[in-house]
Amino acid sequence: MSGNAAKLRVHDLQLGHRSGRSGSFALAVDGLSFDVEEGEFIAIVGPSGCGKTTFLSAVAGLVPVQSGQLSLDGHQINGPGRDRSLVFQQASLFPWRTVLGNIEFGLQAHGRLDGAGRARARELLDLVGLAGKGDKYARELSGGMSQRVNLARALATDPQLLLLDEPFAALDAQTREVMQAELTRVWQADGAATGKTAVFITHDVPEAVFLADRVLVLSNGPAHLVESIAIDLPRPRDPSLKRSPGFLALSDSITDLVMQQSQPEWRVQSDDRHAHLAS
Amino acid sequence: MTATHISPADRQIGAVAPVRRASRATGGGQRRLGTGVLGVIGLVLVLGAWQLSAWLGWVDADFSSSPFGAVHALWGMATDGSLWPPLLSTLQTVAIGMAISVVAGIPIGLVIGRSHLLHGLTEPLISIMYSVPFAVFLPIIIFWFGIGGEARLVIVVWSAIFPLLINVVAGARNLDNNYLQVARVFCASPTLTMRAVTFPATLPYILAGVRQAVGRALVGAIVAELFMGNEGLGYVVQLQTSNFRMDDAMAAIAVIAVLAVVLTRGVAWVEHRFTFWSSSV
């Protein structure tokens, strides 16, 4: 397509769905444009109901593109593909399968559940910290453990692009902290070597700052891009980073930006933080 | 609607639950007797009172039979071999009828449950057919099919297929969309989606339906034998009662009772074995 080699290219994207009996068309995303480079970890934040999840579903191929460009490696996305995996928001594990059976599902669906595939599933079981729990069933798992399986299932197929739809939203605060640290660890152990790209949706700004190379702020729905903020915090990142002044300042200013989308009259405690961000 | 939508949650009042409750109760305190033990005591009390009434001449044992008389008759039927042909005949009718119901009912139920149009069209019909006592169709079925083996099968299928259909349809309708999305995201083929997602996800409903259907199939088979049979346990009950051999009739009834318990417990065991992962078990 165009000259530079963006991994995921979003240009003037329009998404929506017919709602209600009237059949009126409701726009969820309108005029959204940005590029994601290969190997980048992108976090998208925005007011609730702004169309973040619709956008991610469109990238996963579950929601049709209305108009505009949404392309992965130069190919327009028009359905689910083997080059993408989705980590679901809620427990979507198959309760009739063991932990290992769930991790293997993607490989099975791709017809790749041979010796190497099984070895890969076992390797991921260890990597997400569930060694020895492969024979357990979903109902025996805590929320945090379920999302570890969810992550392992998505990583097992070695996707070019990993999509994460608020995977830690349903977890309690402590588990969420642990899982954020675990995700960076797994990412650095598994993703970095193979050059995986990730798009992470969340409404939790500190989570976005902690995980991402770049945070995208979306407007109130229908969503368009408000701001793209590079997070130049060093990696590997560990949870103590969240207490550092630089992290807090960044989180606060992005939080203000998000709040302003849903409440335009929202005033920040210190306006100079904005000036700092804009510069 | 409430009467027709039997979800797996209804298993709480099904055949599996009492056993587990019993073990929990006995584990809890030594002085409390489990419901299993209490059930046996209740049974012994009623049979004892019946036997005593017969011994003391309060009732005419030729008229009412008696537990010992029935056991004696059962022993006689078992040793002279006259018990086995009717038992096998009834079992065969139930087995073939269930096979037809399962083979037809599960795919039809899945298709109806997944189609908004078909569900809308068939829902009232299936509910009515489930609710109306199937015995009212007996004269018509006899008129259509005669009183042979095929007619008995028609009655068994007629009585068994509707509870099965209702459960399978409910299962297919309650299929969690998240599971299907997982299958779509990982590009699972339609065959794999059906085999590895839709079927296991609806299995708790299917097996709950099979358990209900087995009970109704046995009722259907016995009723058919009572009214139009020349073989089977129901026919034995009918024949021996009209011959005034009450002990033999009671013995056949006892065999039917055991058969009913074994069949429903058997399916309940299968249910427990294959849907242990379901949170509602």
Image (cartoon, rainbow, N blue to C red):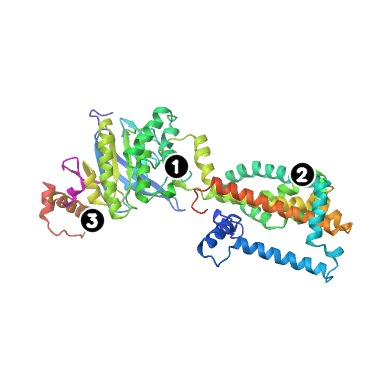
Q: Are marks 2 and 3 on the same chain?
A: no
Q: Residues within 10 Å of mark 2 (few under 14, many from 20)?
A: some
Find out whether residue A232 is within the magenta segment. yes
**Residue under label 1:** A98
Using the image, determine if residue B32 lies above or below residue B165: below
Is residue B41 at least partly visible in the picture?
yes
Which residues are drawn in magenta? Answer: A225-243
Q: Are marks 3 and 1 on the same chain?
A: yes
**Residue under label 3:** A259
Q: Residues within 10 Å of mark 1 (few under 14, many from 20)?
A: many
Label 2: which secondary element: helix
Q: Where is residue A176 shown, x and y percent of the image? A: 29, 51
Foreground residue among A40 and B209:
B209
Q: Where is residue B87 shown, x and y percent of the image? A: 77, 47
Decide if residue A173 is on the left or right side of residue A249.
right
Using the image, determine if residue B187 lies above or below residue A167: above
Q: CA distance from mark 3 to mark 1?
A: 42 Å
Which quadrant would the N terminus of chain A be assigned to in this image? top left
Between circles 3 and 1, the one closer to the viewer is: 1
Between circles 2 and 3, the one closer to the viewer is: 2
Q: Where is residue B112 shown, x and y percent of the image? A: 59, 46
Decide if residue A65 is on the left or right side of residue B142.
left
Determine the chain carrying the residue at label 2.
Answer: B
Choose the circle earlier in sequence order: 3 or 1. Answer: 1
Q: CA distance from mark 2 to mark 3?
A: 75 Å
**Residue under label 2:** B88
Label 1: which secondary element: loop
